Amino acid sequence: MTQAFERTRPLLPGEAARRRREAMIRVDHAGEFGAVQIYRGQRAVFARADSKARAAALVTQMEQSEEIHLKTFDRLLLERGVRPTALAPFWRLAGFGLGAATALLGEKAAHACTVAVEEVIEEHYAAQSEELAEGFEGGDGELKDIVTRFRSDELAHRDTALAEGAEQAPGYALLCAAIKFGCRMAIRASEKV
């Protein structure tokens, strides 16, 4: 079927809901993939200094949590035949780079990065959860449960970063605003591409 015909033909019953669920899974997979890369970048910097052992341990814990999320979305991609985002190679570099750069600025900046990223992901998951709860055509209890559970994990990561002094990072408000903007753009791009 040609793309031109695909765009102009009316959607079959349930097709819009299926496409929306696929977009949700694709973007959530991309987000978890990006989060893993950010924490890997931070860990790569903190693991090099004995004085940063505590920060490295915290980042490792959060990375492990994100790995569980990523494996869950890997499974959903496979089981449901959803194509992943074509932007994954870019998200690998951008995520790792963001993590490493903020870690090089110091622990507080790395934690500020965590706050910004996790707040955007939490907002995103909250919106998805609400959409799925509104009687999404065909329902998807499994996806709603996953999104709800992972949202709680993201809030815990944010709270840990705040407790570690994220708001004391130099230029906290500007740093967070820039990272949040980038995350929101990544979400929009990953839903489609």
Image: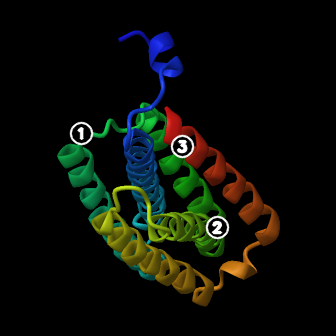
Q: Where 30 falls versus 126 (above or below)? A: above
Rendered location of residue 65, percent (x, y):
33, 72
Residue 94 marker: 3
Task: Return the disc, 3 or 1, that comes first in the chain's sequence.
Answer: 1
Q: Which residue is mark 1?
A: 81
Indicate left or right for 56 with 119 as reference. Answer: left
| Residue type of the residue flagged with mark 2 | Ala
Q: Which residue is mark 2?
A: 116
| Residue type of the residue flagged with mark 3 | Ala
Q: Residue at x 35, y 11 (%)?
A: 1
Quarter of the rendering containing residue 71: bottom left
Q: Identify the secondary structure beneath mark 2.
A: helix
Rendered location of residue 78, percent (x, y):
20, 44
Instruction: Tell me if label 3 and label 2 are in contact, CB under 8 Å.
Output: no
Q: Where 160 falls versus 98 (above or below)? A: below
As drawn, which residue projects farthest toward the bottom?
163
Q: Nearer the viewer, mark 3 or mark 1?
A: 1
Rendered location of residue 6, percent (x, y):
45, 19
